[in-house]
Image (tube, rainbow, N blue to C red):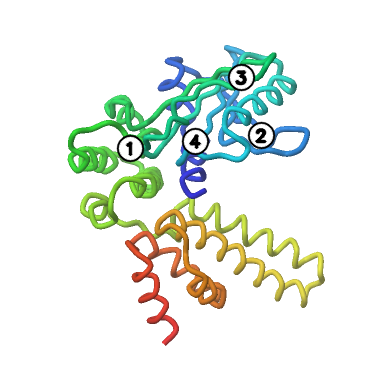
Amino acid sequence: MTYDNTLKYLVEQYPEDFIRYLLAYEATDIQILKTELNQEPIRADSVTFLQTANQILHLEFQTLPASTPPLPLRMLDYWVRLYRQYNCDIEQVVIFLKPTTSEAVFVNEFTARNTTHRYRVIRIWEQEPEPLMLSPGLLPLATLARTDSPQSLLRQVAVQVSMIEEAATKQSISVCTQLLAGLVFEPELIRQFLRREDMRESAIYQEILQEGLQEGREQGIEQGIEQGIEQGIEQGRQSELRLVMRLLTLRLGSINSQLQSRLQELSLAKLEDLGEVLLDFASEADLMNWLNRVES
């Protein structure tokens, strides 16, 4: 989910970069569409409307090929809903982020007895990094591109990030680069080339956190001011807990039940602190040591 949110942020902030890279088309009249499609709500990763071309670019980012329902069926479902709603040409692209030998990353169509639906598939680790380093919005993806020297590639990307002049843009791209680089690089190596930003100040972290806090506040208001404050705080804590658990699972894999129980007892402030340092963890032992320190 972290990588989805990172990439959704990049597409929404830099849609022209993705359109130029994927469609070889210079677009100036684009519109970001709602990603929650009609009927039973399902949410696409990115849906962009190119007004002059009367075309939709629909992107799905996959860390792993496993999906429920299967990805080919999801792509058909997305296409039908988009076409029904907008009645225009739809270009669908699935971008796989993490190297794998699974045959599923080579599947680019859904086939049933009377139906065949095709879409594009990009395995980012097979792509040349140079085109991705030409635009700020694509720079974070360049860390996952093809290379014979991963460390050298990470250094090149870091140099490109450092050359971004606008401070807020540089910070956002740096944070996104570090998050995506975490799919293939160890935290120690990432820190050698990219300054570890304060996650609490980054736009993408704030967006995820504020969604949870706002949900808590809204539920609190409905329950009354006094009760709402208490429930709003707890709802915010639960939202932060879910975020931290997702990040830890992506970073360390499954977390044992004993550690999960200890995490559930943490305050909102401690969960926020954990969200800032967990990218440095390499094993469950690091998490356990951190918990021992904050609980002592």
Badge 3 vs badge 4, beta-carbon distance below 8 Å: no
Residue where numbered disc 4 is placed:
61
Residue where numbered disc 1 is placed:
144
Crowding at dot 2, Cα within 10 Å, few <14 / some 14-19 / many 20+, comes out as: few
**Which comes before the other along the chain, label 1 or label 4?**
4
Q: Amino acid at mark 4?
A: Phe
Mark 1 or mark 3, which is nearer to you? Answer: 3
The residue positioned 52% from the left and 70% from the top of the image is 257
Where does the image place residue 246, in percent across and percent down from the top left?
A: 51, 57
Question: In the shown orientation, is residue 182 left or right of residue 203?
Answer: left
**Which comes before the other along the chain, label 2 or label 4?**
2
Residue where numbered disc 3 is placed:
111
Badge 2 vs badge 4, beta-carbon distance below 8 Å: no
Question: In the shown orientation, is residue 162 left or right of residue 229?
Answer: left
Where does the image place residue 296, in percent across and percent down from the top left?
A: 41, 87
**Which comes before the other along the chain, label 1 or label 3?**
3
- Measure how far apart labels 3 and 4 are at the Cα level: 21 Å
Q: Is residue 33 above or below residue 87?
A: below
**Which comes before the other along the chain, label 3 or label 4?**
4
Where does the image place residue 286, in percent across and percent down from the top left?
A: 34, 70
Q: Amino acid at mark 3?
A: Thr
